[in-house]
Image (cartoon, helix red, strand yellow):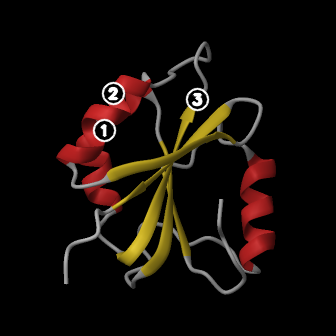
Amino acid sequence: MGFTKGMVVQELGWDNDTDDDLRVSIEDTIDADMVDGDYGNVVDAVLLWWRQEDGDLVDGLVDALTDLVGGGAIWLLTPKVGRPNSVDAATVAEAAPIAGLSQTTTAAVSKDWAATRLVAPKTPA
């Protein structure tokens, strides 16, 4: 997922259904605990756990941009197709540009979760 030692990763949407093995792997990679929504400083990346029942995805993505440093990425984690509360790929594809983001990568990151990397489009200098 591109995380490196020393990065500050903000985790949003954690709940009892998130993948703890994935969380531990990320924290081991960055050699630190992930921070939460109350962190109050800029972060290098956001890990956003999102389920169909969580509401409006555009609002969730806009909120996730709050502390993200320029050039940082949001990793949107959604339950895989066929799992409870899975999010349709078309929903992500529609929500991302409305929130000012571009979808770059999608990958299966655990047994139950898929990750989509979203970034703000580069603007001409």
For disc 1, the marked residue is 57
Front-lying residue, 35 or 29? 29
Q: Which residue is drawn at 72% across and 83% down?
A: 5
Disc 1 to disc 3, how far (Cα)? 14 Å
Q: In which quarter of the image is the C terminus?
A: bottom left
* Among the two numbered marks 2 and 1 on one chain, the one whose residue lies closer to the N terminus: 1
In the rendered view, tell whether residue 106 sits above or below residue 100: above
Residue 41 is situated, as x and y percent measured from the top left of the image, at 39, 85
Three-letter amino acid code at the position of disc 3: Pro
> Which disc number belongs to residue 79?
3
Front-lying residue, 89 or 104? 104
Residue 28 is situated, as x and y percent measured from the top left of the image, at 81, 71
Q: How crowded is the residue under tag 1: few (<14 C-alpha within 10 Å), some, or many (20+)?
A: many
* Among the two numbered marks 3 and 2 on one chain, the one whose residue lies closer to the N terminus: 3
Q: How crowded is the residue under tag 2: few (<14 C-alpha within 10 Å), some, or many (20+)?
A: few
Please say whether residue 55 is visible from this viewpoint: no
* Among the two numbered marks 1 and 3 on one chain, the one whose residue lies closer to the N terminus: 1
2 vs 1, front mark: 2
Q: Quadrant of the N terminus?
A: bottom right
In the rendered view, tell whether residue 5 sits above or below residue 22: below
Please say whether residue 73 is visible from this viewpoint: yes
Is 30 positioned to the left or the right of 69 in the image? right
3 vs 2, front mark: 2
Three-letter amino acid code at the position of disc 2: Thr
Residue 32: image quadrant is: bottom right
Disc 2 to disc 1, how far (Cα)? 8 Å
Three-letter amino acid code at the position of disc 1: Leu
| Dots 2, 1 in contact, CB < 8 A | yes
Q: Which residue is drawn at 72% across and 56% down?
A: 23
Q: Which residue is drawn at 24% across and 42% down?
A: 58
> Which disc number belongs to residue 91?
2
